[in-house]
Amino acid sequence: MRLNQTPEWTALGKHREQLGATHLRELFAADPARGTKYTLAVGDLHLDYSKHLVTDETLELLRELARATGVAELRDAMFRGEKINNTEGRAVLHTALRAPRGAVIEVDGENVVPAVHAVLDRMAAFSDKVRSGEWTGHTGKRIRTVVNIGIGGSDLGPAMAYDALRSFTARELDFRFVSNVDGADLHEAVRDLDAEETLFIVASKTFTTIETITNATSARNWLLTNLRADESAVAKHFVALSTNAEKVADFGIDTANMFEFWDWVGGRYSYDSAIGLSLMIAIGPDRFREMLDGFHRVDEHFRTAPAEENAPLLLGLLGVWYGAFFDAQAHAVLPYSHYLSKFTAYLQQLDMESNGKSVDRDGNPVDWQTGPVVWGTPGTNGQHAYYQLLHQGTKVIPADFIGFARPVADLAPGLEAQHDLLMANFFAQTQALAFGKTPDEVRAEGVAEELVPHKTFRGNHPTTTILSDELTPSVLGQLIALYEHKVFVQGAIWNIDSFDQWGVELGKVLAKKIEPVLTEGRGGEQLDSSTAELVAKYRTMRGR
Ligand code: F6P
């Protein structure tokens, strides 16, 4: 039965009508314990969902929808290694990347856990060598800069996590991340580097991604030119992270310098695999393992916690609720930590590449909303930019606020004290969004009548607050796993394949066709009139 024809969906629709314009102010007034009752603990994360437009009945109806759509069954199939990525015929086993050494998880009858740990051990040995200076470049100098070249999941994860865990990194080493095929990216990354002390990590699951292979080729040229060396220098300055040994060898990287992962790891679910090598060099193998343990804690929570206490299930259901019954198109993620500057960009790929789909698992068009537009930047910067729209705009945008009790870095006392100011803003924003300010409250401040509508805050904007003690490697792992499983839950309910990404293919194919038109003027007649005209203008500007 189609999702929106199920009795559970219909019941939710009716319930939404009954809820009408009920305000969070009323829900809080009706239940003084709401702020305590609607909270969950998962690992080291405290999750407050009291400022959501839900009642006990809403939550029960949403859980019934989860039961009816088989979320738990699909979850168990994923953890068992079944091929739930049906359009690619692959298992979805990022959870195996953080399974403990002794675990048994089989794909096609083979336990994958020993291979996972063998690669982790090789990564650890290599990281230790780079960190200690034992690994040297072609001329015998130690490595001082690591440049990760990759794009999408082969960039966003390590780049985000490196920033997030900056205060745990070996500060004597420098880490840079190159992803864009715009030559400016590589140029800016290497322009002040000493080739003798630079290690390139080429990260690509397929090792066919044009941006990455182009940048890696240019990096190799830069290296050999600057070292005035021949190809033999590559071995000491290039390592590869991939599933494709053949292509790695074709590129000229010795497969002894390759760290492997597997086709059951999706690109956007991969930074806890070999793709995390730059991060492991930065924070060291022990911290990396702590991060994996953090992931695993939330995996176990998701796998075993009852529906009423299951945090990823809850977050997933809330997103379904707003998308379907409030017509919410977007979801904001607003971390109150400078270290999480790239967190939302990372989640954009995780969520939007997974759930940006419009046909169901059987290829039928869906007529319900799927994944939202995920966006946001760290507070408090956003407060002085786009929060105006959150507070007084016309759109329903549920938001996640993520904050920490302690600044993780060893800050000077004055800077340490700023943390309370940061967090005062954190708490104030969800309060303002939920409860707003009524016209009467505005009038009571003596505001002129014509300004009252402008100074009124409607409130009733739903938010989740995630509060933790400190942004440690473990907590980062917990947060990422929480979002991975939230995305999973939503994909399961919407009955879409969250693990393929066919939507990125068309642009790639067309770019390949357009490139010779730009460079050689060949084939322009096949283009539509708009693109043909634009391309002609471009060629003129380039003096061709
Ligand atoms: O954008 C499509 C995509 O395949 C992503 O899913 C992936 O993370 C990215 O390209 C990079 O792919 P690869 O790691 O194979 O270079």
Image: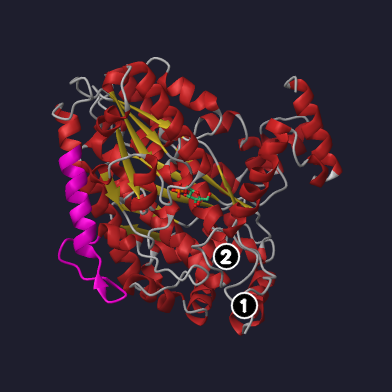
Q: Which three-letter amino acid code belongs to the residue tagged 2?
A: Val
| Image quadrant containing the C terminus | top right
Magenta range is 99-126
Mark 1: which secondary structure?
helix
Q: Residue furthest front?
A: 230
User: Nearer the N terminus, badge 2 or badge 1?
Assistant: 1
Q: Nearer the viewer, residue 320 or 417?
A: 320
Residue displayed at 51% across by 49% down: 349
Say whether residue 76 is visible: yes
Q: Residue beneath label 1, please? A: 3
**Residue visible at 38% across and 19% down in the picture:** 225
In the rendered image of this protein, does residue 407 appear above or below residue 268? above
Classed neighbour count for the residue bearing mark 2: other residues with Cα under 10 Å, few (<14), some (14–19), many (≥20): many
Q: Residue at x 47, y 26 (%)?
A: 186
Q: Nearer the viewer, residue 369 or 260?
A: 260
Residue denoted by label 2: 320
